[in-house]
Image (spheres, grey):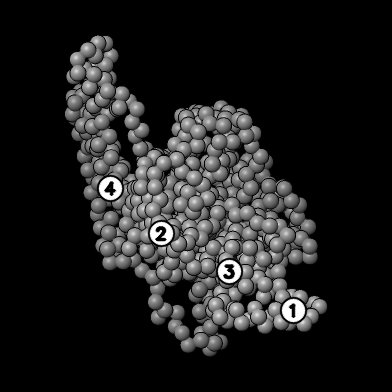
Amino acid sequence: MNILSIENLTKAYGEKTLFKDISFKINKYDKIGLIGVNGTGKSTLLKVLADIESFDSGEILKSNNFKIQYLDQDPKFDPESTILDQIFLTDSFELSLIRKYEYTIEKLNSSPTDEDQNNLIELTQLIEKNNVWDLEHKVKTILTQLGIHNFNQKMSTLSGGQRKRVALASALILPSDLLILDEPTNHMDQEAIEWLETYLKNNKQTLLMVTHDRYFLDRVVTKTIELDFGCVYTYNGNYSEFLTKKMERNLRESAIESKKQKLYKKELEWIRTGAKARTTKQKARIQRFEELQDRNVPQDNQSINISIAHSRLGKKIIELKKIYKSFDDKCLISDFSYILQKEDRIGIIGKNGIGKSTLLNLIVNNLKPDSGTIDIGPTVKIGYFSQNIVEMNQNQRAIEYIREIAEYIETADGTKITAAQMLENFLFDGDLQWSYIRKLSGGEKRRLYLLSILMTSPNILILDEPTNDIDLDTLKILENYLDFFSGAVMVVSHDRYFLDRICNKIFAFSTNGVINQNNGNYTDYKNKTIEIATNSKTETNTTSTNYNNVHKPKLSYKEKLEFEKLPEEIKLLEETLSNIDQSMIEFSTDYIKLNELVEKKELLELELLEKMEREEYFEALINSFK
């Protein structure tokens, strides 16, 4: 059943068109993931649908009483409100009753009067009549599940992540025809993300969300909408099904665009002959040439590679000895020692506010330990990506910002990569490179900031929440960069897929400042903790449940078949490419044949890359099920 129709929707900011004449439908019970590169207009589209921003042309068709609950990527709040007050600020009759009830209870507890007692009786009757008791319970349950326990705490005292969770709770508690969430998992720890994942998956509410969390997308959404170069593409299925269908579309478009480029070259040769364009046929050819010249060709960002900058790293890297650090009598790090190795890829996890960023700040010398030492080797050059973007000159252009750091970087073999080339690798095309920073989206600014760190040619990377507000294409580029990075990496992240993808060790923060060291990625750590908990319960006879009999998620039959076929398909593609390489040698003097072989090789290489990424994705997914 269709509940919302978007027809020929267009939105532009100044000269930049975010999307033009896009159309799609939202059906009841759809769970939609909206994806696309930062700056393409995902958040703007959500705000347009939530009636927060206007649009230039087109139609949004919905019923008169259509209710939308919306979570902003950067929610606003009243610093003087308590957590419950902030939630109850929502314009809702039900919530206003709870707000008045809570306020009356507070008055009765401090200075009771007969009037307050009568108000309480009246409010209680209204709450019972409108079945609001369950709503109050739901508010407090959701807040608790999201790690919020002191409901009377002032909003001004909360961290950014805690404020985001309060805003999320506010969006979840009220019934709506459509729930719109913009980056709901940002600044949330793994436990809260996993709870939200289960909540949204089991809830029958219609959902439209933007998120970079690939596990989240794969386990929650039933439809994927991609916003790409102002166009919309709709795919039925979750993230893994989107990858397959996106690959198929890319292969089709690659073949089509190859033919368009040939046509363009032919038209270019003709137009340069100086045709006078006096006949109808000549005018038609000139018009066709202009259309080809002006056409925006979609670009495939899935297979972008980054050449690796090189900076020599000596044997002595970073050594932490018996580190202690506390704030306001709260111990965050206790007796922690570790010697960083060159091949380390360390993921740092734990609840918000437990001390993860503090550890990074100690290493980069932004903080001093209460006791203990941090010894950094003489050849170490740290690239530190802060959770909060450093101040940028808003009147500077993107390319000027990067060139100010370095005009170029060198690879291990001495090849020079210019600032413009690195910007292009990070999805800043020619026009975007010359955009003023003030005109960039929040995600584009974070991408630019990340690139600025890499342009310093570090040999150690310290990354604090690099995946927040970063699109999936940029995440793949960063992951590819880290695959070939020759130094150690320490990263704080709540992105489970990212931690599985890059890490070989996990530092897990627990209470009282203890940091547990674990070999393997996030899924390995999770499996280990489950196994320990299960064994502990078995030994103490506190449960009769056998963990091995608990139903575990698994690949669907279709996914299992696809995964089983991938090794043979990859082998066949590699053999075909090897044969093409041999043929290119044989036909090195036959330009026409050679050109055909080059085009065929490019298509097959793209297909091979997609198959290998698909195999890697399934392997990570299977590990997460263990």
Residue at point 30%, 51% (across, down): 245
Q: Secondary structure at mark 2?
A: loop
Say which residue label 2 marks.
Answer: 63
Q: Are marks 2 and 3 in contact (CB under 8 Å)?
A: no
Structural crowding at the residue carrying mark 4, measured as other residues with C-alpha within 10 Å and reported as few (<14), some (14–19) or many (≥20): some
Earlier residue among tags 4 and 1? 1
Q: CA distance from mark 2 to mark 4?
A: 36 Å
Earlier residue among tags 1 and 3? 3
Q: Closer to the camera, 353 or 586? A: 353
Say which residue label 3 marks.
Answer: 93
Earlier residue among tags 3 and 4? 3
Q: Secondary structure at mark 4?
A: helix
Q: CA distance from mark 4 to mark 1?
A: 67 Å
Q: CA distance from mark 3 to mark 4?
A: 49 Å
Residue 516, located in which quarter of the rendered image? bottom right
Q: Is residue 572 left or right of residue 21?
A: left
Residue 127, located in which quarter of the rendered image? bottom right
Q: Secondary structure at mark 1?
A: helix
Say which residue label 4 marks.
Answer: 248
Residue at point 49%, 54% (across, down): 50
Q: Are marks 3 and 4 in contact (CB under 8 Å)?
A: no
**Is the N terminus in the top left, top right, bottom left or bottom right quadrant?**
bottom left
Say which residue label 1 marks.
Answer: 116
Residue 383, located in which quarter of the rendered image? top right
**Mark whose residue sits in front, 4 or 1:** 1
